[in-house]
Amino acid sequence: MFDFLIQGFGVALTPLNLGLAFLGALLGTLFGALPGIGPINGIAILMPLAYTLGLPAESSLILLAGIYTGSEYGGRMSSILLNVPGDAGAVMTTLDGHPLAKKGLAGPALGLSAVSSFIGATVAILGLTLFAPLLAIVAVKFGPAEFFALMIFAFASMSAMMGKDPLKTLIGAVLGVLISTVGVDSGTGVLRFTFDMPELYDGIDFVVMIIGLFAVSEILLMLEHAFRHDQDGEMAPIGRVMVKLSEVLYCKWAILRSSVIGFVIGVLPGTGASVASAVAYTTEKRISDHDNSFGTGNMRGLAAPEAANNASAAGSFVPMLTLGIPGSGTTAILLGALMLYNINPGPMMFREQPMVVGGLIASLYIGNVMLLLLNLPLAGVFARVLQVPRWLLVPSVAILAFVGVYQLHSDLMAIYLMLAIGVFGYLLRKFGFSLAPVVLGFVLGGLMEENLRRALSISGGDLAILWQSGLSIGLWIAAAAVAFIPLFAGRLKAKFLPARSA
Amino acid sequence: MRHAADRILSLLLLGLAAFIAVQAWHLEVPFSYDPVGPKAFPLLLAGLLALLAVVLFVRPGPNGEWPSGALLLRLLVVMGLLVVYAALFIEAGYLLITALVSVAIAWLFGASPLKALVGGVLLALGSYLLFTYALGISLPTGSWIEPLLGAN
């Protein structure tokens, strides 16, 4: 049953893939540390380059996955040192991380967060190794009706858990699905929403969409940010990065609980690191905050969200690899990257692409050790990138975006489209949308329509096929159950989440 | 006031839903093997979007701050610069246009003119070397440079 893992280590241990895992870990930590460039931006920017370098699918996925897991490590640095979360998953890390740094404990805080990140990721990678093959066996039984119900479940759990506003999460997802309908309809050859532009016949290109949505809109947001707050505040002095065994032992239950929470939330389709770290933090606050010191620099308050966000990153690979449904916005992009290689992730992948699945999972083990080794002694070096001025960062992002798209298309239309999508993404973000649901809708839209239409053509148009099997009924019930969470979520949030200063 | 933005958005979304519905309705499907065809899915989405837009109109949420005045102007200038970057990317060649745009953006983001100049030029040169030599990516050299090279 674990043949894929042995095969995977064979793939991951080749010099090229080891090098790429290391490069991914390094770049990911850097991207995570740079304020404003999280895992999604990092991957969006580098994906076209990885693709044009002609790397085989598994190598390119190893690089991109390294960037993903690496940036969950890196995100903590600006949280702790500057009180500015490097990405959405690191918001909760500011709550106790920055107070620790202000007390002069930045070094131990960085050390402890690296160790708890490592433990969280390790627990989750083990979970991935154990559960993914099992889930894949169940998922082989899925027909089009079950897949359609599963996607409804994914959108329901996403709207319940992600973003401030469930309504806008849903609207974002619908917009994403709508964008996916542009182009030639594969069933009939009919042109939909192409407005007689041949460039749109193949649909909106995935890379153009992702880079526009994230990188270009980020440029505009960074400009706003730079203009509103001229300085990002003083960076706390780091000192020696180290962690005492006694400190890790003090946090051991917090770390283990949060790792499990992070993994489970990561597995749920559509939810990512930000939810995982928030739930872990509030849970830990309830269980182990005996003297009300959470928020003032409690080590456990730092360890919990860090373990959880790293665990959720590994966990979100489970639905992506077994069902073809991404567990987070970032895995949605990885899924799109696989599709560039004409690999359709899903239950058959363990059988048909054991090199890719196994190589990826094995590289997560390897990359995680590399990340620990990189992040303990070198945290101080990485922290320097926090001082890269925005005026240099922004043109760099623009350059990478342009070269990435140009490389794939050598076509000015693609670049203009990228810019237009960038403005669209910026507006969405200003209206309070998160972009992950849009990406998820965009990636899943095609599959969703295909499965719906296939199911209905099996039944000759009878909608009842959508809820005829026990499995699909279960998924519809799960979707309905999850959809009711937001009704209580507001109350829960008010109770446990302290007000954010960002 | 803070809710006004969401109300405007909901009207825009309603308009979009109507537009999609009309477009989808007028799709001409020559023949179709499956009972649903390419029309139904966009129509379904348009309906869903319209429904959500109505809910948004009834229950708008608070929005963030919208840029105005000088900030809005800067945003437009940066967008304009990016469009110029795109328009001249092939004509002017990667090195020249990247340097110009980088300097301009750096300056807009508050670098002193000297820093912007040095930083932008180095960024263009460095990225050019990285892309062409380390990554083997071919970048446009620019049509203006070829006659110069030919003359030599």
Image (cartoon, coloured by chain):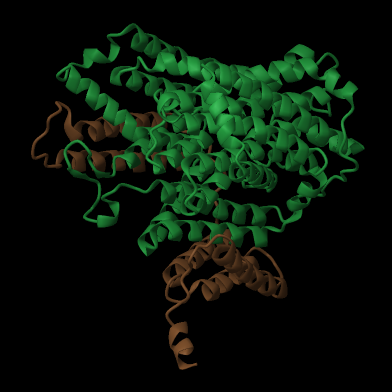
Chain colours: A green, B brown
Q: Which of A240 and A225 is in front in this view?
A: A240
- Residue A435 horizontal side relative to residue A175, left or right: right
Q: Furthest residue to the top? A: A470
Residue drawn 23% across the image and 26% down it: A453
| Residue A271 in sight in this render | no
Residue drawn 59% across the image and 62% down it: B134
Q: Where is residue B74 in the image (x, y as percent from the top left)?
A: 56, 63
Q: Where is residue A153 in the image (x, y as percent from the top left)?
A: 41, 20
Residue drawn 45% across the image and 57% down it: A405
Q: Position of residue A23 (x, y in %)?
A: 64, 47
- Residue A234 horizontal side relative to residue A389, left or right: right
Q: Nearer the viewer, residue A367 or A230?
A: A367
Q: Quadrant of residue A281?
A: top right
Q: Please determine whether, in this image, residue A389 is positioned above or below residue A283.
A: below
- Residue A107 horizontal side relative to residue A305, left or right: right
Q: Please determine whether, in this image, residue B97 is positioned above or below residue A343.
A: below
Q: Nearer the viewer, residue A28 or B120?
A: A28
Q: Furthest residue to the left? A: B30
| Residue B139 in sight in this render | yes
The total of numbered circles placed on residues is 0
Q: Position of residue A362 (x, y in %)?
A: 60, 30
Q: Please determine whether, in this image, residue A392 is positioned above or below residue A153.
A: below
Q: In which quarter of the image is residue A248?
A: top right
- Residue A97 horizontal side relative to residue A196, left or right: right
Q: Furthest residue to the bottom? A: B151
